[in-house]
Image (cartoon, helix red, strand yellow):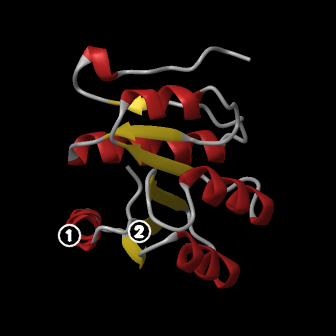
Amino acid sequence: MEQGVQILLVDDDQTILRAVRLLLELDGHKVWEAEDGEVALQLLAVRKFDVVITDSFMPGMEAAQLVSRIRQMRPEQPIIMAMAFRQECQAFGQRPGRLGAMLRKPFTLTELQDAIKQVLTTHSQDQPSIGMVSATKPQDVFLPPNP
């Protein structure tokens, strides 16, 4: 995977923010943190990111709102969403073009690396975004139906 990727990490859980940031920085990436959707949008207004990685459930602005607002600002922005529940993955994945990849929590560093690689490859090829859960267990994998 390409190193030096500029990543915006959005999560209201400070422990997760610190842990994922550390993993990504050790992998050679530059990471900015946002503890909620509003802060993420403020950062996106002044800076371009290669990838946005966001939690699906946060107080204040829900993930669907955040993704919609990001799409209004930057239609081609690669977005990865981390979700705790399979039902969330299925509901979000059925909306074509909204997400580049989905991760089911808990995820591994390898799964995160694969998701980043997937969205950057898709974005660089100017292909439409696809929904995907990167997972190690077959029952966790969800690919949305083709439109």
Q: Residue at x 46, y 34 (%)?
A: 88
Please tell me whether residue 3 is drawn above or below residue 112 in the rendered image: below
Residue wearing tag 2: 4
Q: Could you tell me if residue 6 is visible in this image? A: no
Quadrant in which residue 13 is drawn: bottom left
Of marks 1 and 2, the one in the foreground: 1
Seen at 72% across and 62% down, the residue is 69
Say if residue 139 shows up in the picture: yes
Total count of labels: 2
Element assignment for label 1: helix
Q: Is residue 23 above or below residue 78?
A: below
Q: Name the secondary structure under disc 2.
A: loop
In the foreground, 43 or 38: 38
In the image, what residue type sits under mark 2? Answer: Gly
Image position, residue 30 (x, y; %): 39, 74
Q: Residues within 10 Å of mark 2 (few under 14, many from 20)?
A: some
Q: Amino acid at mark 1?
A: Thr
Q: Identify the residue under disc 1.
A: 15
Answer with left or right where residue 5 lies relative to residue 99: left
As drawn, 3 above or below 47:
above
Query: Does label 1 or label 2 sit earlier along the sequence?
Result: 2
Quadrant of the image containing the C terminus: top right
**Residue 75, horizontal then vertical, whole percent:** 76, 55
